[in-house]
């Protein structure tokens, strides 16, 4: 919901699964970006990318059945609403959104779509499937993702300044300014536990990861130490 009336109550807006998804996806993308050009850390790169893909698919499901402000129907709006929101930011009464604002919503959709595209092309590259330039497409998508992340971060900073509320802290605590009636009733801790369990399953090898040997998670990768898996060890990191 959107309102130009200043909200003074700090209410629970973001459930725990949304917050965990946000920070785990950020860590996964950052780690995958850092390890992208390293043959030595290829397995870790694959694991991080696959984790990001799993997280996004779970977020899509939660965007359909999750709590009030987690659902796509609560924050995804058309171009006119986005333009109206952006115009309000330079007025004396900026439009406040209890959940995601209309402009930020589209950045989120772009991040989800780009993540899935990056993971899909990455898995295809590892399987030697698709056109020869698919690796270049994979890298271009990752660069586009970095640009959208930059726009998203800039939007968070701008929103924090305009509305005088720390949006980064809100994504940590789950609490934002809003009317009491807009609060969610529960942080959904059991769903959060299930989310963490799935990610742990990926990283421990309980859940197989395409591109890696069966049951080879973080433990196996760490045990053998970073080394080139194929194409020879060029010594480049």
Image (spheres, helix red, strand yellow):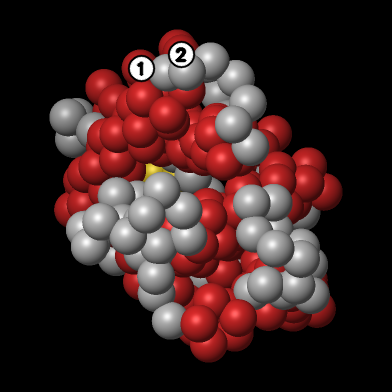
Q: Are marks 2 and 1 in contact (CB under 8 Å)?
A: yes
Answer yes or no: is residue 112 visible. no
Tell me what residue is drawn at x 41 percent, y 23 percent: 137
Viewer-side residue, 7 vs 74: 74
- Image location of residue 23, percent across then percent down: 46, 66
Say which element carries label 2: helix
- Image location of residue 175, percent across then percent down: 49, 70
Tell me what residue is drawn at x 64 percent, y 51 percent: 211
Tell me what residue is drawn at x 60 percent, y 81 percent: 220
Viewer-side residue, 236 vs 100: 236
**Residue receiving disc 1:** 83
| Left or right: residue 173 compared with residue 59 | left
| Left or right: residue 141 compared with residue 24 | left
Q: CA distance from mark 2 to mark 1?
A: 6 Å
Tell me what residue is drawn at x 24 percent, y 42 percent: 150
| Left or right: residue 147 compared with residue 107 | left
Q: Quadrant of residue 213?
A: bottom right
Answer yes or no: is residue 203 visible. yes
Quick check: 154 above or below 26? above
């Amino acid at each position: 919901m959107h309102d130009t009336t200043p909200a003074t109550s700090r209410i629970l807006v973001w459930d725990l699964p949304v917050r965990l998804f946000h920070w785990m996806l950020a860590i996964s993308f950052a780690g995958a970006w850092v390890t992208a050009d390293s043959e030595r850390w290829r397995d870790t790169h694959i694991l991080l990318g696959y984790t990001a893909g799993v997280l996004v698919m779970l977020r899509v499901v939660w965007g359909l059945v999750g709590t009030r402000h987690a659902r796509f129907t609560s924050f995804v709006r058309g171009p006119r609403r986005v333009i109206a929101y952006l115009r309000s930011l330079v007025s004396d009464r900026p439009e406040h959104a209890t959940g995601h604002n209309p402009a930020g919503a589209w950045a989120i959709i772009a991040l989800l779509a780009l993540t899935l595209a990056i993971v899909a092309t990455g898995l295809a590259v590892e399987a030697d499937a698709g056109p020869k330039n698919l690796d270049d497409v994979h890298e271009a998508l990752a660069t586009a993702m970095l640009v959208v992340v930059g726009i998203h971060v800039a939007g968070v900073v701008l929103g924090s300044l305009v509305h005088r509320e720390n949006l980064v802290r809100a994504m940590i605590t789950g609490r934002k300014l809003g009317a009491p009636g807009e609060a969610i009733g529960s942080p959904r801790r059991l769903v959060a536990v299930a989310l963490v369990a799935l990610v742990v399953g990926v990283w421990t090898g309980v859940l197989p990861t395409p591109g890696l040997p069966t049951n080879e998670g973080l433990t196996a990768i760490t045990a053998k130490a970073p080394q080139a898996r194929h194409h020879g060890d060029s010594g480049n990191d």
